[in-house]
């Protein structure tokens, strides 16, 4: 009898063990199935989100650009029909200051701006804490050497040349003369050069350092003067017709002071931004610039 009871207990224990094992397997299977379902749902959600993002990118065809009036907005107007052919609508708003165009791009109200060169962009980011990046250089406005009392560089020996006295513009003037072989500057001074950095002056040139706006007014009193683009135009001078020398598109100054398209960091690869930059660098726009600004605005490479 005792043996029988022990046997019955053993059988019951085995039955409970079997039932418990079966329950564990079923629970594990259910848990696994639930996890798989959740994973599939997450994957589906991610796929849907990616598809929706792509659809937004593909259908976002309006490009809002903040720009200075001349020449930037004029160049953008010339680009409008070219972008329309690609399915993009270009909206241009002119700003008279150099602060708001960056702030409206930082805020996301505008897609891009076109008014500034790289040193200004970098300085603005540092001072204002903005996150703007250059996505393409479009044009530069060259410095030129213009006639004063002399009309030919054959008479440069012992000449007097008026140059702007602020650091950036004076350096550009001196680099223009160095690039054309008239002076030599200390190695490495680049866009910080002043007349104190001249180490060779074989033509015995005398430099007259003046506030930039005064240089055109002194042309009747000096042999030559180096002017930046806007002051030359105000004086009725053009690079194409009047300049004896001007910055080339492969000069250090041109590379530094090229006017760029700027966007908020992270938007560099948006299809519409790429379309904007490619269009502004197209042969059609380069031709427009060359035909309309008489050398005062030059396409950048």
Image: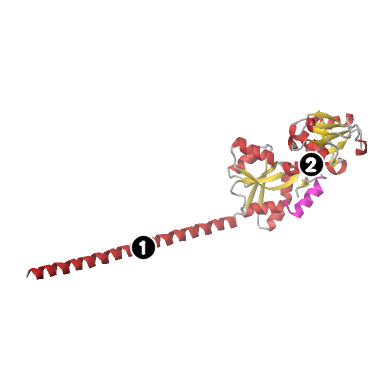
Instruction: Describe residue 262's horizontal placement relative to residue 183 as left or right.
Output: left
- Name the one closer to the observer, 196 or 270: 196
| x 61%, y 53%: residue | 270
Task: Provide the major secondary structure of the magenta segment.
Answer: helix
Name which quarter of the figure residue 146 lies in. top right
Residue 190 percent across, percent down from the top left: 75, 38
On the image, numbered disc 1 is attached to which residue?
32
Name which quarter of the figure residue 225 lies in. top right
| x 26%, y 65%: residue | 21
Q: Residues within 10 Å of mark 2 (few under 14, many from 20)?
A: many
Instruction: Report the mark closest to the observer, 2 or 1.
Output: 1
Residue 60 percent across, percent down from the top left: 60, 54
Residue 113 percent across, percent down from the top left: 66, 44
> Looking at the rendering, in which quadrant would you find the N terminus?
bottom left
Magenta region: which residues?
281-293
Q: Earlier in the sequence, mark 2 or mark 1?
A: 1
SS for tag 2?
loop
Q: Residue furthest front?
A: 3
Q: Is residue 94 visible?
A: yes
Name which quarter of the figure residue 275 lies in. bottom right
Residue 62 - label: none
On the image, numbered disc 2 is attached to which residue?
142
Residue 167 percent across, percent down from the top left: 74, 32
């Amino acid at each position: 009898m005792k043996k029988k009871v022990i046997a019955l207990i053993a059988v019951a224990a085995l039955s409970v063990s079997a039932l418990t094992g079966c329950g564990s397997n079923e629970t594990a299977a259910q848990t696994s199935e639930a996890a798989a379902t959740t994973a599939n749902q997450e994957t589906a959600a991610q796929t849907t989100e990616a598809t929706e993002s792509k659809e937004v990118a593909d259908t976002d065809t309006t490009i809002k650009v903040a720009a200075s009036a001349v020449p930037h907005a004029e160049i953008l107007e010339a680009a409008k029909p070219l972008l329309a052919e690609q399915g993009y609508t270009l909206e241009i708003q002119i700003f008279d200051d150099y602060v708001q165009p960056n702030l409206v791009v930082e805020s996301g109200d505008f897609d891009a701006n076109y008014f500034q060169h790289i040193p200004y962009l970098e300085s603005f980011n540092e001072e204002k804490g903005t996150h703007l990046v250059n996505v393409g250089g479009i044009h530069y406005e060259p410095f030129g050497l213009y006639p004063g009392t002399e009309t030919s560089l054959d008479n440069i020996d012992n000449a007097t040349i008026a140059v702007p006295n602020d650091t950036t513009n004076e350096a550009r003037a001196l680099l223009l003369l160095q690039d054309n072989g008239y002076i030599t500057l200390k190695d490495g001074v680049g866009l910080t050069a002043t007349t104190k950095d001249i180490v060779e002056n074989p033509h015995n040139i005398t430099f007259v350092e003046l506030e930039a706006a005064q240089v055109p007014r002194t042309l009747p009193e000096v042999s030559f003067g180096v002017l930046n683009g806007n002051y030359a135009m105000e004086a009725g001078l053009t690079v194409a017709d009047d300049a004896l020398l001007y910055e080339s598109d492969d000069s250090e100054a041109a590379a530094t002071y090229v006017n760029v398209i700027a966007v908020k960091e992270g938007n560099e690869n948006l299809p519409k931004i790429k379309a904007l930059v490619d269009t502004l660098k197209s042969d059609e726009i380069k031709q427009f610039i060359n035909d309309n600004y008489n050398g005062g605005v030059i396409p950048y490479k």
